[in-house]
Amino acid sequence: MRRTYLYALLFSVISIYSAQAQEKQVLLENVRILDHKTQSLTAACNVLITGNVIQKISTSTITLNNKEVIRINGGGKTLMPGLIDVHVHMVFGSLTMAQMMTSDLTEEFLFKSIGQSAHNMLMRGFTSVRDVGGPIFPLKAAVDAGKITGPRIWPSGATVSQTAGHGDFRTPNEKSRRFFGEASRAEKYGATFIADGRDEVLTAVRENLRFGASQIKLMAGGGTSSAYDPVDVTQYTLDEMKAAVEAAEDWGTYVTVHAYTPRAIRRAIEAGVKCIEHGQLLDEETLQLIAEKDIWLSLQNLVESTPDMDPLRVEKRKPVIEGQEKVWPLAKKHKVKLAWGTDFLFEPELNEKQNEFILRLQKWFTNAEIIKMITHDNAALLQLSGLRSPYQGKLGVVEEGALADLLLVDGNPLKDLKLLADPTKNFVVIMKDGKIYKNTLKK
C-alpha cells in the first residue's frame, strides 16, 4: 500500500515537472521597456515569457536549457503593453444598420463578419477590449477557444434599458412585450433587455451574469443613435437603478451607465454605479463629485457628424460633440479617473481608424499620459470586475508576473505617438497571452 502511494506521488511530481518543462517560452532580447512610472524607456534588457506570463526581466543574459525557446532579437526596439479599448461594440461596430436589420442575419454571416473584425482589432495591437453592449457571448467563447483570432473580451452582454430608453431598438411596428407578449427582434438576438420596474431589472442583470457578463451596462440617459429618447432625458428611477447595482454587487462586479447629462449621472452616482460611459455634457460640479466618489469616467472622442447622417441624429449629436471639447480638460483638471474608448457603431469602416483616434487625446494630454491611459489605466478599469473578470492576472504593464500581452514597436512612442497610429508598419511583434500573432523580425 505504502509503495503504491509513493509511486503515485513520484509519478505526480514527474508529471508536474514535465508539464512545466513543456511550457512554451519566448525570449525577447535587446528590447527597451516603456515604463509609465518614469515616463521613459529602460536600458536594453531581455524579457523571458513562460506560458502566458512574463517570468523574468534582466539587463544580463538569460541562460536557458530549453532548446525549443523562441528567440526574438528586438534590436533596441520599444516593448510596451498591448493597447486596450474599454468602450467597443464588437457586433454593432462590425455591421451596418442595414445589415443589422436584414432578415438574413445568420450565425454563419455574423461569425464571418465579426470574426474578421475581431482579428483585425488584435492585429492593430488591441489585446484587450471591454464590450459594453451587444450579443457578444458566442464571439467571446470562440476567441477564447482559439476558433477565432481576437482580443481578450470583457463582456457586458445585452444592454439593460427601460421602455423608450437608449436600448429600446424596436421598430415602429414592434409593440411592448409586457402588453402584447412578444419579445422584440433585438431582444431575441441578445442585443438588449427592455426591463421596467425593479423585478425586471433584477432579472435582466442576472440573466447577463448567468451568461458570463463581467460587468453590467445600464442605460441611464438619452442617446444620439436611438430614435425615441432625446439626449436630455433621464432614464430609470433611482430604485430601478439601485436594483441593478445590488444584483451586480452580489456577484462581485459593477454597473456602468450610458449617460451624458449631470442629472442622469448624479442619479447613477446616488444608486452606486462605479463607472460612467460618455458624460460629454457634464458640468464642473458633477465632475468634482465623480472625483470625490472615486468613480471611473469612460470617455471617448466621438467621430464628427457627416453630411450623410440622418438630420435628426446630427441635431441630437451637436451638443455632445461640442461638449467633448470641454469635458476632457475639465476631467483632467479635477483628477477624475479617466478611461478611453472609441464607441464605433454601425460604421465598420471606422474600425480601421481605431488607432488614429488615440491621437485625438494630444489636445489635452502628453504622450506619456495617453499611453498610460490606454494601457495601465484602462487595465485597472477592466479589473474592477473582480472575480467576474474572465482573465485573472495583471495587464497594462511590462513587469515580472504580468500577463504577456505585448507590443514591440519600431520607434519610441513617448516621443512620436503617431507610431501607434500605423500598426501595420510599426508593430513588429504582437503577442497576446504569451502567443505570438505577428512577428516581422523572423529571419
Image: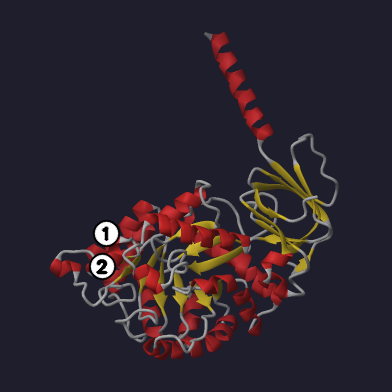
What number is the disc on residue 15? none
Q: Is residue 294 left or right of residue 108?
A: right
14 or 288: nearer the viewer: 14
- The residue depicted at 41 percent of the width and 54 percent of the height is 108
Query: Are the residues tagged 1 and 2 within 8 Å (C-beta)?
Result: yes
Q: Is residue 239 left or right of residue 111?
A: left
- Amino acid at dot 2: Ala
359 or 240: nearer the viewer: 359
- Horizontal and vertical percent position of residue 43: 84, 60
What number is the disc on residue 203? 1
Q: Estimate how packed mark 1 is, as few (under 14), some (14 to 19) or many (20 or more) residues with alpha carbons within 10 Å.
A: some
Q: Secondary structure at mark 2?
A: loop
Per the image, the residue denoted by label 2 is: 195
Above or below, 186 against 290 in this view is above
Above or below, 304 against 115 in this view is below
- Horizontal and vertical percent position of residue 150: 55, 56
- Amino acid at dot 1: Thr
Residue at the limit of the structure toward the front, as seen here: 104
